[in-house]
Amino acid sequence: MLDFPRWKQLWFWFIALSACAAALPSICSVAGLPWPSALPAPKISLGLDLAGGSHLLLEANPAQVASQRLEAMEERVRSKLRQTGKVRIGDISNRDGALSFMVEDPTQIDAAREAILPLTNGVKLTGARDWDIKVVDGTRFVLTPTKEGIDQAIAEAMDTATEVVRKRIDALGTREPTIIRQGQDRIVVQVPGLKDPTALKELLGKTAKLEFKLVDTTALASDVARGIAPPGDEIVPFAAGANGAQAGALAVKRLGGIKGDRLTDAKASQDSRSNQPVVSITFDQDGGARFAKLTTENVNHPFAIILDGKVLSAPNINEPILGGQAQISGSFTTESATQLAISLRSGALPVDLKVVEERTVGPDLGADSIRKGMVAMAVGTLLVVLFMGVTYGRFGLYANAAVIINVLMILGVMAVMNTTLTLPGIAGFVLTIGAAVDANVLINERIREERKRGRRVFQAVELGYKEASRTIFDANITHIIAAVLMFEFGSGPVKGFAVVLMIGIVTSVFTAVALTRMWVAGWLRRARPTEIVI
């Protein structure tokens, strides 16, 4: 136990000094001291409660998810029955939250059921169906979404929306946002250091649902103006400023277009002819092939570029557009084109999100919390150092050195991991300082017991570390389990506390057991004492 080869000593010192060095940029930042730009500078990010920033609560409309599922199922049913080449159906209705259509030939009922049955199966482990199928009046199919299917769709939509929100915020260059689900249809967004959330709200408020749909040139302008759409069409209004007007609408084919989920890239650029800001987009292989087919089959026909239910432009297809690339033009400014490119790159939100709560936290409260936290940490460390020095003498000094290195190591590990420090994290930090010497107390008390039993110095120290280490590791494993559970099932402040606690447990065991044992072993080999004061 007290045998420390040179390589192990160098390895322990390397770990300790490397972690301590990683803490220096954060310490310099808090102290207001400059840090050389040529050196790496890992820093601890401060949470919203310490650095100030913006808090947004976003809410989705679950009814929109159900409506989207009906539309998607309608297109899938049409495509599937078209592939069979046997079943002829009438118009499909999606009223009252259900999908219904009539089979023209009653003898084809079984063939129709067999074709659409796979579309209604759920993918969950339970094997429950996402849709119920009924045949009414002998020829009319009615597909009704099940509650399980809707709940699953809402959960998937909110998970996707959370990830899209994260990508958009990261694209803004804002560091360490906190983005978590709340309940069934809400997302909490906290961005430390962001004083004005206006641009962020605009970015998150855009669904960025991009669609390319064919314009129905046979629709009467008078009917479109009154909101009357021909069968199979839908009326889509122009975006403000688009088409040189503030109002107006187009009749477009409801099905058969191309959606923006096939995009692989989007960049803000300048049109070489008009010198106006545009957004250049690139499709994936499948999307590029579908776009080429759409433009090839509809030369000399207009198609509408629709963003979030508004027509940006409706250019004429003069020739096939091959290569999977296109441009989106509209009444863009450089800033709006950049934001649209970010939205398209990060993906479309599967459901609209609206801000239902907004708070801006100033940095003053956080600065006061940091100051009081530092005071608490300093006072706690001082009291612990005095207690250990008075109680255990030389062994207490080793424990005190381990506490100081432990504090620096925690800061260094948090900086390297780019962990966010919150107010509960500071509480966990202060708690860790007291827990850091707990292992040394157990070791030193065990050494005292062995000396009282008459064992010699070397044997007492060796047995003290050996026997106490078992208890120390068992106790800290239970702490780690508790911290992991808090991190896994907690949110916000609880997670901040758990992160610091987990890091502190690992570093305190290393410093209190490994480092102090190395120091004590080196002193015993050099001094060869026959008596120790402990």
Image: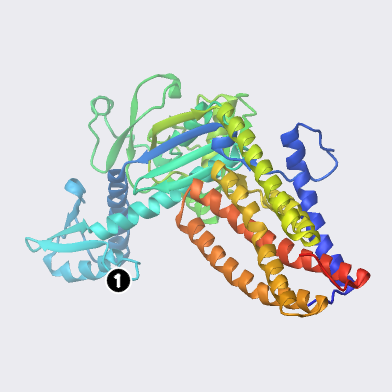
Decide: is 268 above or below 454: above
Expressed as whole percent of the image width and height from the top left, the position of residue 110 reads 18, 71
Tell me: residue 449, above or below residue 240.
below
Q: Quadrant of residue 43?
A: top right
* Residue 441 position within the rendered picture, expressed as x and y whole percent measured from the top left: 67, 63
Q: Residue at x 59, y 51 (%)?
A: 431
Is residue 423 visible in this depiction of the protein?
Answer: yes
Q: Height in image: 274 above or below 47?
A: above
Q: Which residue is mark 1?
A: 127
Q: Nearer the viewer, residue 173 or 46?
A: 46
* Dot 1 alpha-carbon crowd within 10 angstroms: few under 14, some 14 to 19, many 20 or more: few
Left or right, 478 with respect to 183, comes to right
Instruction: Give coordinates of residue 386: x percent, y percent.
Output: 72, 49
- In the picture, the quarter occupied by the N terminus is bottom right
Q: Is residue 286 left or right of residue 464?
A: left
Question: What's the residue at 77%, 80% (across, down)?
Answer: 455
- 337 displayed left or right of 518: left
Identify the element where label 1 is drawn: loop
Q: What x and y, as percent, mark residue 432?
A: 62, 53
Foreground of the two, 411 or 270: 411
